[in-house]
Image (cartoon, rainbow, N blue to C red):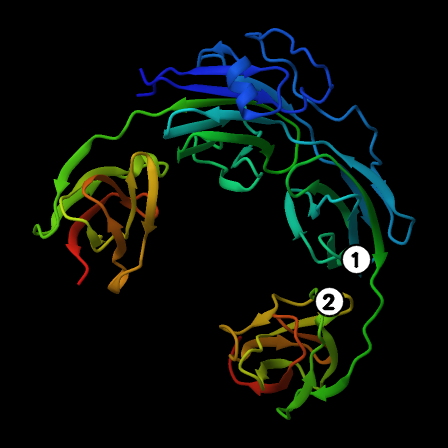
């Protein structure tokens, strides 16, 4: 089992100013919300402004100690429709999702480097909702082939999937000589290739249509070593990709 | 297959380092639960067709967002049409009950004032007939849609099908034409395929007077030649 510690911090629980943390608990404390406020229920054309108080959405901070791919899930019973956002430590959005999980639940899978992140849950229609949020370290996808520069095109098939990761496959790329390489992936007649190049769980480049005729294309300086190339169709259909790696002249 | 992983729940720490150091362990099976509070939703009752302006003005550094709904239908959304990052919606509304929903863009807590006013009428800058003759208008420089708009009075002598065209004089102009009659928007706005392209459509028009609201989608003052020409056939 990959060693990993994600530290979840329920937002708003930490503003009390106490110098002594209470002991850790296996029971999540209730999320922070603004004290109950009675907002106005009606508004009239031409009348004086009304004041409303908006509650903060629940959010959790977590620390990634080991680089890898992580999945964040947010679930809520229908008809509640939860939306999920993954933020970096500056509060900038790295990814967001509405319906990649089962039904209308939200799911994000992303390669993360060690650091502090936060996850925020909201309801798509701004209604009340009861949400459960979890984080998972994902197993690597198996490598279906190993490609070296100059090889004939390698055919790789990706399945149809209900969300991006489920529709993805991976191949390995082995580089012996440092240089800039062009990685190209052409989809079949009924699909469009999208690819993501990584090394050591760090995403180096992504492309869906950088090359001619809709070919996904990445020009990347690469050092000797092994890289991972993730492939899928842009809208998660089954797809046959023709993949080549060649030095850029 | 998912691996189990350790999640360290921290109850009182602010930095990532502190989190990692002080965490107690939880297994993945112990998902975290929370309640999402409903965002403020106020009911707006409209008794006659009119154009309204809804403003949401946040305090501090918050970023107010607005939505106008009728039942389950989203009538309009806005993020930043007001001053700064405040939200503003201008909308022609029919009589009925609407909901004004307010939230913060980053889902932080926020205090916001909300106001609904009757939109002041725009003074037409020209009057034209549906006879094919072109009338050129100059759109306004404006930082939101209504502020960038001008209106033209259109007189239609006889009912029929007409080709409505707004031709931009400048390549960076993207005209949008909206038909208004009796404080109701008549059909979808007419737009072109992008900057420099004419906005054109064929519409069935009744005899009478219409208002044609014109703007450059980019919000800059530009010249648009308007023409409404009788057309054969059905729209």
Residue in view at x 41 percent, y 22 percent? A136
Indicate the chain on which mark 1 is placed. Answer: B
Question: How many C-alpha atoms fall within 10 Å of the one at disc 1: few (<14), some, or many (≥20)?
Answer: some
Residue in view at x 24 percent, y 53 percent? A190
x, y (%) of residue A113? 41, 33
x, y (%) of residue A145? 14, 38
- Disc 1 vs disc 2: Cβ atoms closer than 8 Å? yes
Vertically, is B90 above or below B135? above
Vertically, is A82 above or below A174? above
**Which residue occupies the foreground of this view, A71 or B169?**
A71
Q: Give whichever of discs 1 and 2 has the lower sequence position.
A: 1
Spatial CA span between label 1 and label 2? 10 Å
Please tell me the numbered disc located at residue B53: 1
Q: Horizontal placement of A82 versus A181: left or right?
A: right
x, y (%) of residue B121? 83, 70
Local secondary structure at mark 2: helix
Quadrant in which residue B36 is drawn: top right
Quarter of the figure that contains the N terminus of chain B: top left
Quadrant in which residue A26 is drawn: top right
Question: How many C-alpha atoms fall within 10 Å of the one at disc 2: few (<14), some, or many (≥20)?
Answer: many
Q: Horizontal placement of A228 versus A176: left or right?
A: right
**Which residue occupies the foreground of this view, A13 or B154?**
A13
Local secondary structure at mark 1: strand
Most extreme residue toward the left is A152
Residue in view at x 64 percent, y 40 percent? B106
Residue annotated with mark 2 = B146
């Amino acid at each position: 089992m990959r060693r990993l510690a994600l530290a979840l911090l329920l937002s708003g629980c930490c503003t009390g100013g106490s110098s002594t943390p209470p002991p850790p608990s296996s029971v999540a404390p209730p999320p922070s919300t603004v004290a109950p406020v009675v907002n106005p229920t009606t508004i009239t054309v031409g009348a004086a402004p009304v004041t409303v108080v908006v509650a903060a959405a629940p959010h959790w901070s977590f620390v990634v100690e080991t680089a890898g791919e992580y999945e964040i899930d947010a679930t809520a019973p229908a008809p509640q429709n939860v939306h999920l956002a993954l933020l970096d430590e500056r509060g900038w959005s790295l990814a967001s999702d509405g319906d990649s999980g089962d039904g209308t639940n939200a799911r994000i899978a992303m390669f993360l480097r060690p650091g502090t992140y936060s996850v925020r849950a909201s309801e798509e229609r701004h209604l009340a909702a009861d949400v459960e949020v979890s984080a998972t370290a994902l197993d690597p996808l198996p490598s279906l082939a190993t490609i070296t520069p100059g090889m004939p095109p390698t055919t790789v098939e990706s399945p149809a999937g209900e969300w991006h990761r489920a529709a993805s496959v991976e191949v390995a790329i082995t580089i012996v000589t440092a240089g800039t390489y062009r990685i190209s992936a052409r989809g079949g007649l009924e699909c469009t290739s999208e690819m993501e190049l990584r090394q050591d769980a760090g995403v180096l480049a992504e492309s869906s249509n950088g090359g001619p005729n809709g070919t996904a294309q990445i020009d990347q300086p690469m050092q000797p070593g092994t890289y991972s190339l993730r492939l899928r169709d842009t809208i998660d259909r089954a797809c046959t990709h023709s993949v080549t790696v060649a030095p850029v002249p | 297959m998912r691996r189990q992983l350790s999640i360290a729940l921290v109850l009182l720490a602010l930095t990532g380092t502190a989190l990692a150091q002080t965490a107690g362990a939880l297994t993945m099976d112990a998902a975290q639960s929370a309640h999402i509070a409903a965002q403020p939703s106020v009911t707006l009752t409209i008794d006659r067709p009119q154009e309204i302006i809804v403003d949401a003005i946040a305090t501090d550094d918050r970023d107010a967002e607005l939505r106008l709904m009728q039942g389950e239908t989203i009538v309009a959304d806005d993020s930043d049409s007001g001053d700064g990052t405040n939200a503003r919606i201008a909308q022609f509304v029919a009589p009925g009950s609407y909901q004004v929903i307010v939230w913060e863009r980053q889902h932080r807590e926020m205090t916001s004032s909300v106001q609904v006013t009757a939109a002041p009428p725009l003074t037409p800058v020209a009057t034209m007939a549906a006879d094919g003759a072109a009338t050129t208008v100059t759109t306004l420089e404006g930082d939101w849609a209504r502020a960038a708009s001008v209106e033209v009075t259109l007189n239609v002598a006889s009912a029929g099908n007409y080709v409505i065209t707004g031709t931009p004089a400048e390549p960076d102009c993207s005209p949008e034409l909206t038909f208004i009659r009796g404080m109701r928007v008549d059909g979808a706005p007419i737009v072109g395929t992008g900057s420099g392209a004419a906005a054109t459509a064929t519409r069935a028009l009744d005899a009478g007077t219409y208002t044609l609201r014109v703007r450059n989608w980019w919000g800059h003052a530009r010249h648009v030649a308007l023409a409404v020409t009788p057309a054969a056939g059905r729209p």
